[in-house]
Image (cartoon, helix red, strand yellow):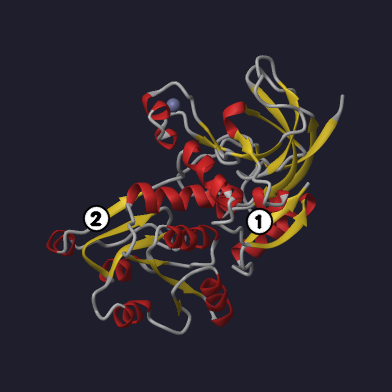
Amino acid sequence: MATMRCVVVREHGGFDKLRLEERPVPSPGPGEVRVRMLAVGLNHLDTWVRRGVPGHTFPLPLVTSSDGSGVIDALGPGVTNVREGDAVTVLPALSCGACEACQTGVDQLCRHYRILGEAADGTAAEFVCLPLANVAPKPAALTAAEAGSVGLVFQTAWNMLVRRAELRAGETVLVHAGLSGVGSAAVQIARVLGAQVIATAGGPAKCARVLELGAHHAIDHTSRDFVAEVRTLTGKAGVHVVFEHVGAATFDGSLKVLQRGGRLVTCGATTGGAVQLSLHALFFKSLSVLGSTMGSKGDLRAILRLFESGRFRPVLDRTLPLERAGEAHRLLEAREAMGKVVLTV
Ligand code: ZN
C-alpha cells in the first residue's frame, strides 16, 4: 500500500511534538476529491493546536494545518464537475451543508463546523481528501505557496470588516499588528473598501512594510502609545472601527480610540482573553463589540477572485519543506516572520 508523509500532533507540547509520520495514502469517498498537496500555509492556530489550550480538547492525534493548495489527483464516486489535474486552493473548514446556517451562507455558524487541522485532520500531508465544497480553483496569478497561504486569514478578516463591522468607504479603521497574517489581510481589505487605514506594527521595518501594503499611517507600537497616536492622527476624533485580535494587551486602548457609534470587532486574544469593559463607555458612546470567527466559503471564493484580479497580494515571508514544520512554528511564535510561512510538500 502506498504511503505518504504528514505532520501529526499526538500530544501537546514543544516543537518536538510535531511528528513527521507515514500513513496510507487516503482514497476519496463519495463526493470527495483527493488533493496532492503542494503548499501548506501556517497560521497561529497551528501553534495553539500543538501547544494545547487550557479547557479545550483537540481530537488528537491530528494532522496539523488549515490552509493549502495543490492539484486534484483522484475523484471520489459522484464527483463530476472538477477534473484530475485541476489546481485548487483549500477552503479551510468543513460544515454539514444541510443546516440553516450553511444554506444561508454563514457556514461558520454551522453546529458541525470543523476547522481543518483543529477539529479534523488538516492539510499538512502529501495527500488530503476533502469534500468538493472545500476546494476552489487556484487563482492563476498566485504561486502554489501564495495560494496556500491566504485562505484562513483573508476569510477571517473579510468576515470581520465586511460582514460584522460593516466598514464603509470614508471611514477610518485601526488595524492592530498590520503585518500579522490576519492584520495584513485586514489592511488590504480595508483599502479595497475605501477606508482610511491606520495600522500598528512592531519596529521601523515592519512599519515600512505595512505602509507598502496600503496602510495610510503606521504606528510603531514598540516605541509609541497607539492611543495617543490615533488621537493625534484623527484630530482627537477617534476611529470608526478597531480590528482587534491581540486581546488583553490592547483591548482597553482599542475601546478608548473608538469614536461615538464605533465598532470593535475581534477574532482573537493572543495576549489573553480576560478584559474589562466599562458599560458606561459602551452605552454612553453607543459602541458595538463584535465577535467573529472564520468566514463563509462563499466569501472566500469571492476573495480568491480578488486575488486573481490583483486587488489583493499575498504576503509571504518564506517557504520551508514539510519536515521543518518545527522551525516554521518557532518563527511564528517568535513573531520573526514578516508575512506568512508556508511548508512546501
Ligand atoms: Zn451546517
- Ligand 1 visible in quadrant: top left
If the image is split into quadrants, where does the N terminus sit? Answer: top right
Picture coordinates of residue 327, whole percent (x, y): 72, 60
Kind of element beneath mark 2: strand
Residue at left offset 24%, top offset 79%: 236
Q: Is 173 placed left or right of 45 in the picture?
A: left
Indicate which disc residue 338 carries.
Answer: none
Three-letter code for the amino acid on which mark 1 is drawn: Gly
Report which residue position mark 1 lands on: 14
Picture coordinates of residue 217, whole percent (x, y): 43, 76
The 10 Å Cα crowd at callout 2, few under 14, some 14 to 19, many 20 or more, is some
Report which residue position mark 2 lands on: 288
Q: Nearer the viewer, residue 323 or 85?
A: 85
Q: Residue furthest front?
A: 309
Q: Is 230 placed left or right of 192 in the picture?
A: left
Mark nearer the N terminus (1 vs 2): 1
From the Cβ of disc 2, is ligand 1 less than 8 Å away?
no
Closer to the camera: disc 1 or disc 2? 2
Residue at left offset 54%, top offset 80%: 203
- Examine the image and state in which quarter residue 88 appears: top right
| Tag 1–tag 2 contact (CB < 8 Å) | no
